[in-house]
Amino acid sequence: MKTIVLNLNDTIASCDTLVVKMVNAKESCLSMTKETETNFNDVLIVALICAVIVFLAWYGISNYFKNKKVERECKNNMDEEKRKQDVEDQKNKQLSEVRKELMNFHRELAFPYEKVKVDNELKFVKKPYEKEGSEKYIKHLDELIEKLSNQPNQEKDDSKQ
């Protein structure tokens, strides 16, 4: 019977004991263990995972830039519509001013008197006006009204051709 000193709290064990046999079995197993090997399947799996990651990144970035492009186009369309609205509003304002001027001139022709203070008294004095000049002015205002009211329709007709 052999005695072997094991480093288990400095205990002495004989050869036939279970502890000695376990230690011997452990030593024999250490020499038989191998590292895991890699093969081509592992390389394929890693390559596939990397390809999926690259594809997802590319897909996300491309969608981001597509959305930005659509936003820019929508903003440009809105700006263009706003410009058209502004031009139309400006034409409507001009038309309104010309019509107002024509109405004021017709009112002056209908009531050609003005108040004049003479010796602390208010008197109505008839305003002199030139008939030919007044008719030209009215004709000119009518032409402006016609031109301004037909102008948006002409632009629409030009876009159809």
Image (spheres, rainbow, N blue to C red):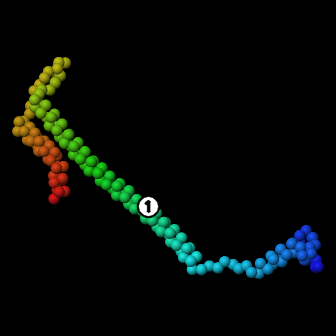
Residue 48 lies left or right of residue 160; in this view the side is: right
Residue 129 lies left or right of residue 52; in this view the side is: left
Viewer-nearest residue: 68 or 124:
68
Say what secondary structure mark 1 lies in: helix
Q: Is residue 55 above or below residue 43?
A: above
**On the image, numbered disc 1 is attached to which residue?**
64
Q: Is residue 114 above or below residue 74?
A: above
Viewer-nearest residue: 92 or 79:
79
Viewer-nearest residue: 46 or 123:
46
- Count neighbours of disc 1 (C-alpha within 10 A) and say few if under 14, some if 14 to 19, many if 20 or more: few
Q: Is residue 66 visible?
A: yes
The residue lying at 13 percent from left, 23 percent from top is 124
Q: Residue placed farthest to the bottom in the image?
A: 31
Q: Position of residue 35 (x, y in %)?
A: 69, 78
The residue lying at 74 percent from left, 81 percent from top is 32
Q: Position of residue 158 (x, y in %)?
A: 17, 56
Question: Which amino acid type corresponds to the residue marked 1 in the rendered image?
Answer: Tyr
Marks counted in the figure total 1
Viewer-nearest residue: 76 or 69:
69
Q: Position of residue 33 (x, y in %)?
A: 73, 79
The residue lying at 89 percent from left, 73 percent from top is 17
